Image (spheres, rainbow, N blue to C red):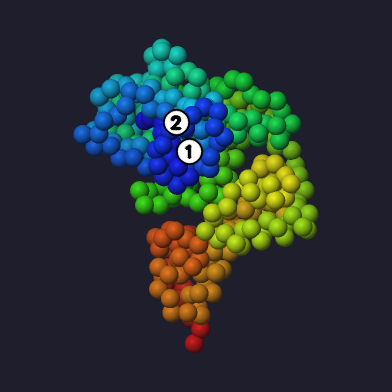
Amino acid sequence: MAERGGSPTRGNDERRPGVAPTGPSVSFHQLTEASVVPERWTGKNNFSITRLQSPFGIQNSIMKASSVKAMLVTVSLRSIPLGRYQLWADAKPLPTPYVPPFRTNVFDFDSAPTCWSGSPFDFIHYHIPRSSLDDIAEDWELGPIWDYRQSVIEDDLVLAQLTKNLLPSITKDNTPCALILDQFQLVIGAHLLQRYGGITGVHAPSVGGLAVWQKRRALELLRENLDGDVRLTDLAKECGLSVSHFARAFKAAFGVSSHQWLIRQRIDRAKELLSRTDMSLTDVAAKSGFGDQAAFTRTFHRVTGISPGRWRREHKSR
């Protein structure tokens, strides 16, 4: 249950305070009985998602730290019996009841959150830099939020559902593309501001769509990067907007978020290849911007309701 970030895809190199944030990262760690878990586990300076699981638990407590001002959100993926899980903040033990699946902890890293589990566990950790939260607040015409409410084993339906939606994309062999992670960061950041930042009832200001030239430029970049290897920051910069403003303006213009638009383009490209070529499904997945065939099949079925193979049999050009 410790937080450790990665490189823009994977990795564990440390960052020094003051270094500009890098792109989002995802990592998956499965501990074994022989795994050595450090007593202090330091997160990085970017938005990162870490899945950490162990079939044994851990012997020592772990203090979680960050190289920048940041919030830590953890979501349990499996239950932990009463008395087998303990949390501390500001060096003080916190009342920690039985942990059901998909319950949430929210901490400011300044409180030096520390944990221990004597039973098997499976957690998702979100490391969210305060700078990204401040950017969203500024776009909402609010000042920086100085204090966030701490929560322990909270039943947060929004964070639970966001995590459930993301889980199929986080495996040892696959991670979401940068564009999806950027969009996810905005959604989870907005939720933290509203539920834990004390601004409940304040909503993001409404915006119009994009100008014609902004639409053209945004779609050019998206079509050039079907694999999703483009950042929201890049799209927003090309359109002369802040990240959160661009994200809302894009959805106002096209009815879907930028990564949902990208998925539609991938599926359209895949349909074209399935109907007009004899490429293998693996090659179709690669040519359509998917990381692997499993991700392609899962997404294709979710969008169309049938598998790629069946769709090809029904639509193959004769």
| Residue at 62% across, 58% down | 222
Can the viewer see residue 305?
A: no
Can the viewer see residue 122?
A: yes
| Residue at 50% across, 51% down | 177
Q: Is residue 231 left or right of residue 170?
A: right
Mark 1 nearby-residue class (10 Å; few <14, some 14–19, many ≥20): many
Q: Residue 54 at what x, y percent from top left? A: 28, 36
Q: Is residue 129 left or right of residue 247?
A: left
Q: Residue furthest top?
A: 92
Q: Residue furthest bottom?
A: 318
Numbered label attached to residue 43: 2
Q: Is residue 199 left or right of residue 4?
A: right
Determine the image quadrant of residue 113: top left
Q: Which tag, 2 or 1, sits closer to the chain's start?
A: 2
Determine the image quadrant of residue 34: top left
| Residue at 58% across, 52% down | 230
Element marked by disc 1: strand
Q: Residue furthest left?
A: 34
**The N terminus: image quadrant:** top left
Element marked by disc 2: strand
Q: Residue 140 at what x, y percent from top left? A: 71, 34
Residue type at mark 1 is Ser
**In-front residue for pair 98/257:** 257
Residue type at mark 2 is Gly
Q: Is residue 297 above or below residue 179?
A: below
